[in-house]
Amino acid sequence: MKKILFAIVIFCSLNAFAQSESTFSYTEFHEPKINVGYLILGNFDVTYEYLLNEESGVGVNLMVPFDDYVEWNINYNLTGYYRFYFGDNYADGFFGEVFANLNSVEDRIEVEGVRQDKDITDLALGFSGGYKLVSSGGVVLEVFLGGGRNLFSEYNSERNFDFVLRAGLNVGYRF
């Protein structure tokens, strides 16, 4: 009887160990976010990020001004990015990113000897970095700063700016 009881105890304990070592599957890969810093200044700036794994994610960002509180001369910004996370948690902590930014601005340039306002569309490539906090409930808070340079416009030498700023204070939710 003792041998049977001993065998049952050993069998149950092995089964318990096998269950405790099961792999954890992380299923929260989506992060919609809004940039509250730009929202205060009159720009609608939203981001969607898809987490590829615990160390990286890809995302897309759209910024469109809706108020003339600050005169940005921006028609729109559409940004795609790849992020690499350095934190210990799943896609959390410090990060670095590379981005491509399709931007359209109204700028005052000289065309054939005459200064005039012109809509200019260009593509900028750049780098940025920041920090992301994710609560246990899924609330996301991130701050980031970076910049890039416009590459293709024929008017880059005459423009007021050819540098693209990428900055923000984003609040969102991970699900």
Image: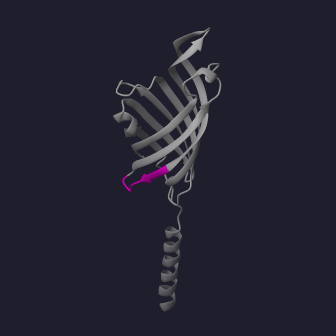
Q: Position of residue 157 (x, y in %)?
A: 63, 23
Residue 112 lies, with reference to residue 123, above or below; the image says: above
Q: Position of residue 136 (x, y in %)?
A: 38, 56
Would residue 11 appear left or right of 133 to someone viewing this image?
Answer: right
Give me the residue at 51% from left, 73% from top: 17
Disc tally is 0
Q: Nearer the viewer, residue 10 or 144?
A: 144
Give me the residue at 52% from left, 36% from top: 165
Give me the residue at 61% from left, 33% from top: 149
Residue 79 placement: quadrant:
top right
As drawn, the residue found furthest toward the front would be: 113
Q: Position of residue 174 (x, y in %)?
A: 42, 47
Indicate whether residue 132 is drawn in magenta.
Answer: yes
Q: Nearer the viewer, residue 88 or 145?
A: 145
Would residue 21 appear left or right of 67 to someone viewing this image?
Answer: right
Residue 53 lies, with reference to residue 116, above or below; the image says: below
Indicate whether residue 143 is drawn in magenta.
Answer: no
Q: Nearer the viewer, residue 146 or 101?
A: 146
Coloration of the structure image: one colour
| Magenta span of residues | 131-137
Q: Nearer the viewer, residue 33 or 53?
A: 33
Give me the residue at 39% from left, 30% from top: 43
Q: Position of residue 155 (x, y in %)?
A: 62, 19
As drawn, the residue found furthest toward the bottom would be: 2
